[in-house]
Image (cartoon, grey):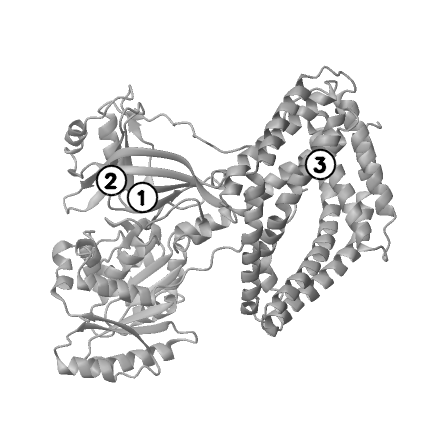
Amino acid sequence: MKVLATYNIKGGVGKTSTAVNLAYLAAREGRRTLLWDLDPQAAATFLFRVRPRVKGGGRALVTRKRPLEAAIKATDFENLDLLPADFSYRNMDLELDDTKKRTTRLSQLLRSVDDDYDIVFLDCPPSISLVSENVLHASDTLLVPLIPATLSLRTFGQLTRFVADSQENPPEVVAFFSMADRRKRLHRDVIDAISREHTRIADTVVPSLSIIEQMAEHRAPVPAFAPTSRAARCYEQLWAEVRPRAPEAAGHQSDRSAP
Amino acid sequence: MLTPVPALQAPDGSHLDLDALVDALSSDFAVSAGGKRLVHRTRLDTFDGRLRAAGLTLQHETTASTERLVLSGPDVASTIVAHVTDLGWPALAGALPDSPVRDAVAPVADIRALLVVADQRRRVRRLELRNKDEKTVARLELDEPTGASTDAAVVTVHALRGYEDQARRATRLLTGLGLRPAEEGGEPDSGPEESTPTIERDAPATKLIAMELGEFLSAMRENLPGLLDDVDTEFLHDFRVAVRRTRSTLKLGRPVLPPDMQSRWEPAFKWLGDVTTPVRDLDVYELELPTMSGWLVGADAGDLQPFAAHLRRRRAVQRRALVRGLRSVRYQRLDAGWEQALAELAASEDEQPSAGELADRSISKAYRRVVRDGAAISASSPAEDLHGLRKRCKELRYALEVFAPVIDKDSRKTAIADLKDLQDVLGRFQDSEVQRHSLREFAEEMMAAGTPAQVVLAMGELVGHLDAEQDRAREDFEGAFARFVRPSSDRRMRELGGRR
């Protein structure tokens, strides 16, 4: 099971759109996929028409009173399940702080669904917090949407330092430009000038497109309601860049001679 | 994700009325019915039914606009679906698009190709059941036969994770209409299955031999189409096993068989064995190449690529000769004439000796020869002597298998397990011997064709590994033979040979 988190300290950069669309694409190619909407704003949960409610709230999950599996809901799409957001997630920092292994609890919880899913997406709230630290521990890859603007890059610098300082084996950070507008000179300049020396920047740039905003209207991922749109193609390209590779199929065995 | 529950059908298996279903469900759900889609369902398995044996069901479903693989089975947490394009069969599972379906199927199918084992066309209509939030909470599939088929129409309720209670509610509404769980259909075309024929010990030996030879002829015929189409390597392998068993049975049956079996049919099947050998030998190399690559220490696995290409070219040439041989008039005459000869053998009225007597005599003789030749092997014996002993072991193994219907089942099983250990050691020795010689031959051919030195050096490493493996097998021989002739094993073999 591979865990990918869409994360940024800044809000409104396209984290949820990315998580929802890439999770849909992973599921579409047959991977058993779970999306955990960790953001109490519950945008991903809303997009999948699931009620933003977990029995017992975040506390029940964190304290294991309620198993993770029991809170999971199927979406309307094959192979794609959702662990919904709950408004109580706003207190998740406090709940985690009360537990013994406070920075690795989410990782422990996810182990209980290890056999059920090939890929888990974590859609994270925008912050630097105990939840974020847990996300870093639990993830194999951190997908960071960046708006091509100076302040956004500054925040990205903070984020990479936070990741580097967080643990011995930090997740791979893959940033990509999101909500980009090539008509804006600043956007073009930032995209061209960013240093790829220390960070992996995906080649795919997801533009600012109204069809992405229409996800809230259709309550579905872009490739589901507009499969031939430019936005759908962008997310497909992004997924092709960041998708975890499956292990090789088992080797052949030969049976040289019959008895 | 979907968790299927048993399908429902009308009590008399007749047509299901969509409007009646929708009416019943509308009391609790917003129901939307999709259009009818013609679904072509192809069930896939290997020729020897490996998926079925592993409890897996793999279907390739195509509609006008979609194509997908659907895998279900006990070891799969739920049904796995992978969207695919332009798949054709037969195909090796390893060549399927990268997906969890491939990950689950490839280790099971291994080197066998996936073939179409059942094929049906159905008209399928999907119904979505939604709650007040317009969230889909259950799905139904109304699945009807096409054309003049008399199969029952069925409706399946698929529960969605986290909404299982809604699926139960939908099922209750449908059973309220009088629907009942659908009858399980029989599995069509389950493929060949191994079975031990039954025959009494005092039945004529010719009857047992005719029956066994008939089984081998059937196996050859079953494997011939896949062999000619080169579906996977195991069709040729299994064909050769049947040929080899035929040859051994003819040899074992010499005391009771008519003279023309030895004069006409033994050479005929030797020819067939010889025709099929070159391609099988090359198949073995190709199958073992990934393992061989792992032996390399100094060289890189990529250095063996030209060797792999050389093998493929040689195989293409040899395969043409093989196909010519098996499509020849000579082969057709062999097949037809052999069937006729077996019919005559089965009809012969020779009562003596009995199958039991011949079994005792054959097993006893084959065992004595293994013990005699094995005892003569020393650390300095030439490779031919070990090869000779390997042949004696095979004769004993075939005797235990051919006469299986008339000897004690448990003793036979243990005896074969004992013998197998010895055969494995001798097999390792002889395979190393043959492969070393072939590798040298290949290397000479490739050098003459201007192959770079690093390739030949890599092949040299393989020869070195095989040398060491052969030495290890020789060292292991003494222990394996001692175990084979230990008192308990010796007693068992003598009992199987009729000395009680």
Q: Are marks 1 and 2 on the same chain?
A: yes
What residue would you read off at disc 2?
B139
Is A193 in front, or is A97? Answer: A193
Q: Report in which chain the residue with disc 1 lies.
A: B
What residue would you read off at disc 3?
B267
Percent x, y of residue B252: 76, 31
Secondary structure under the numbered disc 3 in the rendered image: helix
Percent x, y of residue B255: 79, 26
Q: Where on the picture, by quarter, is residue B484?
A: top right
What residue would you read off at disc 1?
B2
Nearer to us: label 1 or label 3: 3
| Amino acid tagged 1 | Leu
Nearer to us: label 3 or label 2: 3
N-term-proximal mark, 1 vs 3: 1
Mark 3 to mark 2 CA distance (whole Å):
64 Å
Q: Is residue B123 left or right of residue B303?
A: left
Is the C terminus of chain A in the top left, top right, bottom left or bottom right quadrant? top right
Q: Are marks 1 and 3 on the same chain?
A: yes
Q: Report in which chain the residue with disc 2 lies.
A: B
Mark 1 to mark 2 CA distance (whole Å):
9 Å
Q: How many C-alpha atoms fall within 10 Å of the one at disc 1: few (<14), some, or many (≥20)? A: many
Q: Residue at x 84, y 39 (%)?
A: B369
Percent x, y of residue B100: 40, 52
| Amino acid tagged 3 | Pro
